[in-house]
Image (tube, grey):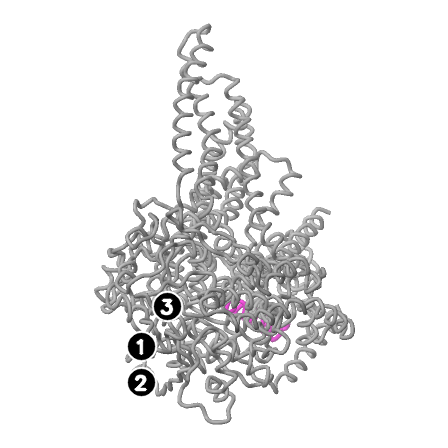
Amino acid sequence: MMNSAKSSLMLSRSANRNQRLARWFGEGFLLVVTSLSMLAVLFILIFIARDALPFFSWTHFKEFFVSTAWYPTQNPPSFGALSILFGSLLVTLGAALVAIPLGLTAAVCLSDVLPFRVRQTVKPVVEMLAAIPSVAYGFFALIVFAPALQEHGGPMLAWAFWLVVTPFLALTLLVLADLAAARFAENRQNLVRGLVFALLGAMAAWGLWKTGRRLHGLEISSGTNALNAAIILGIMALPTMVSVAEDALQAIGRDLRMASYALGATRAETLVRVVIPAAASGILAAAILAIMRAIGETMVVWMASGNAARIPEPWYNLLEPVRTLTATIAGDMGEADQSAGSAHYHVLFAMALVLLLFSLACNIVSERMIARTRRRLR
Amino acid sequence: MQTQKQLLIAGLVALTVAAAQAAGDAQKIVVDGSTTVGPIAKAFAEYYMKAHPDVNITVSESGSGNGAKGIINGSIDVGTMSRAMKTEELDAAKGKKRNPVQHIVAFDGIAAVVHPSNPVKNLSKDQLRDIYTGEINNWKKVGGPDLKIVVISRDTNSGTYETFQEKVTKSERVTDRAEYVGSNGAVRQRVQSTPGAIGYVGLAFTEGVKALTINEIEATTDNVISKKYPISRGLFMYTDGAPAAGTALADYVGLYKTADGKKLVGDQGYVPVQ
Amino acid sequence: MLRLGTRKLLDRSFTGLGVLSIALLTAALLILLAPMCLRGSGAYVFQGTVEFRRVLLEKFQRGDRDELQRELALVRRARQPVFDALAAFQKELAVMPVAQRRKIKPDFEQVHAAVKELLGPLPGAEVPLMMRGQYGQTRWDRAQVKIRKILFAEDYDFSGGGLGRKVLKPRAATFRGTALEPLFAYVEHHAVAMLAPRWTFYGRFLTDTSHDAHFFGGIGPEALGTLYLTLGAILFAVPMGVIAAIYLVEYARENRLVRLLRICISTLAGVPSIVFGLFGLAFFINTVHLSANKSVLVGALTLGLLILPTIIRASEEALRAVPEAYKQAALSLGAGHWRSVRTVILPAALPGILTGVIISMGRAAGETAPIIFTAAVSVGKPLTLLQTFTQPTPALPWNIYNLCSEHVAVDEIRHVQYGMVFTLVVLVLLLNLAAIIVRARISKGLRT
């Protein structure tokens, strides 16, 4: 702040003006540069919408959302994207089923259960999972996982089913037995508990065995199917779920937990009954972000989901190939005639628009939820 | 702080020098299009670049449709296609003042391939059509084991798909159970690793899978030359106008006429032009 | 009410559940990385045969010429019986009765072709134009596959009904009594002498150009292309991102425009990567015509847009994490706002910004969808700096997809695919490791 008058610290009028102008220009420049990112978003929206809307102004609009016949190069072409939309949703649903429970338990474990040292070693694992490029996941899905599913799919599914469901069932039965025994007198309780557990346990074991054997005998004719894509996408979406959920859980603070412990709850009860509900909006935001990640992923589904534009029979049959929006855009874009502005070109941009709007919606909702968590805790 | 500034300036100077040195290197040929013609284009590119190291030939294989696109838009120099340009594409080219010139660089057949463990050896053209339209969905209906047929098809980008549609399925729709992959190589891989699969590939891609006889005629280059094999096609390279004689582009595109070019084509499993 | 014992059991099993999920995560990571690392390192460290050393000398001008000549003399002597057997059988074939000849000729042609694949062109025969026919097997593991092809005929036994079962028939049985019979036992026992395999470390795999559609050579053009794209993306995104972060943290007032800006930035973060690719194609190439067709410039710009939100977020966090005391101290010493930002706050936030930049570099290097339409080709020469403005380039992510699906001989170049994936994953993980280290240094610095 060198000034013209050496005697006083106040600026001359011109120097003052110059300085104010400089600051104004400087801030303006910063604002312009920052607005470039806003411009980028606007341009993306404009260009995608501009090339998508010509499709929607035709009668194709209804066909797009209702028909499952996707034959864009046939004469006459049909642009029924329902099966493709369904494919995207099915694969995302599968990925959510993998990522959300696993991610939530991992986040809870990271934030509340593990000691600090162990936490510092586990966090890099999650970050590494996030850092692996999507084409590497796609490569794994196509070259390693698909043949494995084809050759050993049945046994893999059966063992995964047994390993996951058995502990859950055992615990549920234990709780049920306890609740049943509580109605009886003190001296009979153990007997009742044992009986109920044995009875229910036998039924559950039989059910588990039957379902397991049925899974074991499954013949997976094609390893590139919705299951393959769903599992790999779930693993890709896990880090997002874990980190955002963990942030939400950490943000709760110790007071709530301490109060719960003071009232005599075990750690599990505190977590399940107090902490998780308190962080519910943050956890929901994490789930939405994970879903957003899964639905926007291109390479894995292009390589490993089979690309058959068809709704599987029955609709939840993950063992059949499906086609997603992203894979259709990536695969068909080369063919679509840009210069002549054919309907094929516009329908691909329509798909991009659907993806964009869905991501936008997810983004807005998750931001609101995170803001709500912050507001509640202030 | 001072040394950091010096390093930065030195770095910038080095970059500019490197850029200036690179200014001399200019020639490029951009090739894009069919995955069937891709191996030929790549072999030609390698052969040509060995003799002329100052030319950079880049090859992509995004599909015959994209090859046509690129020529119409003027964004590529050579468009490889495994089908002829359609009338709409030729009209679009005329609208953009482009003049696509067709060069037939090879002939090829489309073989129907299955996994080697599949006992089926022959299919009639009608049976093949029915498999692809979904009428037949189990191998036992064509004399094979009781196994669901996994139908592999090429996506809409593909000239191979167009030829297959023109010669086999005609105007009927391919079943929606069909799995779509993006290239000949991908079809071969899927069929090689899936016992119940059937697919169609160019003759150069039949290693590791079993090529069926169609109407009892084998898919060999001889049968393609004699036109006995029912699913044959020409392989094309398109340029915008005939390339001026003596330019790198003309030499590259004209390789199919030379003896070496024909040998390269033949070695890969295609039928060189006679 | 539940018993105390049950509650304790539930508590313990909940902990167990948490630990199990972490274990599953780690297992998933290991299952993902193990095949990539094991087989990928096989592209760098493997048993290379004398053919590999020939390729290195003739195409890349590396290696000891004299020693190679000596080796080749030894190898040629070891191979001579094979060629003699083949020639002798040719003569036998010429005088064989027609029916027998017709039966045995296809098998002989298979053996002949397999020997050519294993050892390269026979002496005196015409040298093929394509490079893959000019040399034998360069890797010992592939050589063993070819040896098995020589020794056994692969056939399928359809007698049981249903799918055929693979049956390996020893070829020695087919050719019993002919001049070709001793060839098989010879090949089996003298393969090592014929090919001279030696453990090689092919470090230049990363920088060598590929020859003949990746049959030989390395992944140099792809690695260079990835480097160009990543650096270009950083060049575009970092200045814009840091400036935007400075504005948002230090200068922005909480008015509607700024809130809109923040919404836009977080929207940009949520756009799927394929949409970026479409935008790059529609805007940079088709509208603005930055380059006539695909080019590294357009690809770098598209990737830069992709990583911009991450950099803005990371820089914002880093700037906010600088203690208020620093800023107050600078202001109290008479520095203006801008000077205090430039000389005090920014340097203090630099490690955090650097972390964000490094992680974004990893992201930009690994993304495929944005470069499919804007910058990537399957085959091309390594570009010089000036060419990046107008020419497309091969890049690691795109070529991984390309090689594992489109390539004409996928099994022959399996090691190159794994090598590319390994290289890309190692690159990205190293970048992340660097970011972690930088972050650890920061937390240590801020704690003092």
Chain ID of residue with mark 1: A
Q: The disc labelled 3 sits on which kind of residue?
A: Glu
Q: Please name the residue that numbered disc 3 is placed on.
A: B218
Same chain, marks 2 and 1?
no
Question: In the drawing, does residue A284 fall left or right of residue C310?
Answer: left
Q: Position of residue A35 (x, y in %)?
A: 48, 66
Same chain, marks 3 and 1?
no
Secondary structure of the residue carrying tag 2 is helix
The CA distance from mark 3 to mark 1 is 41 Å
Secondary structure of the residue carrying tag 1 is loop
- Identity of the residue furthest to the left in this view: A59
Q: The disc labelled 2 sits on which kind of residue?
A: Gly
The CA distance from mark 2 to mark 1 is 9 Å
The quarter of the displayed image where residue B127 is located: bottom left
Stretch of the chain drawn in magenta: A12-34
The quarter of the displayed image where residue A297 is located: bottom left
- Identity of the residue furthest to the bottom in this view: B245
Same chain, marks 3 and 2?
yes
Q: Please name the residue that numbered disc 1 is placed on.
A: A340
The CA distance from mark 3 to mark 2 is 43 Å
Closer to the chain start, of discs 3 and 2, is 2
Q: Position of residue C111 (x, y in %)?
A: 55, 65
Question: In the drawing, does residue B11 fall left or right of residue A123?
Answer: right
Q: Are marks 2 and 1 in contact (CB under 8 Å)?
A: yes
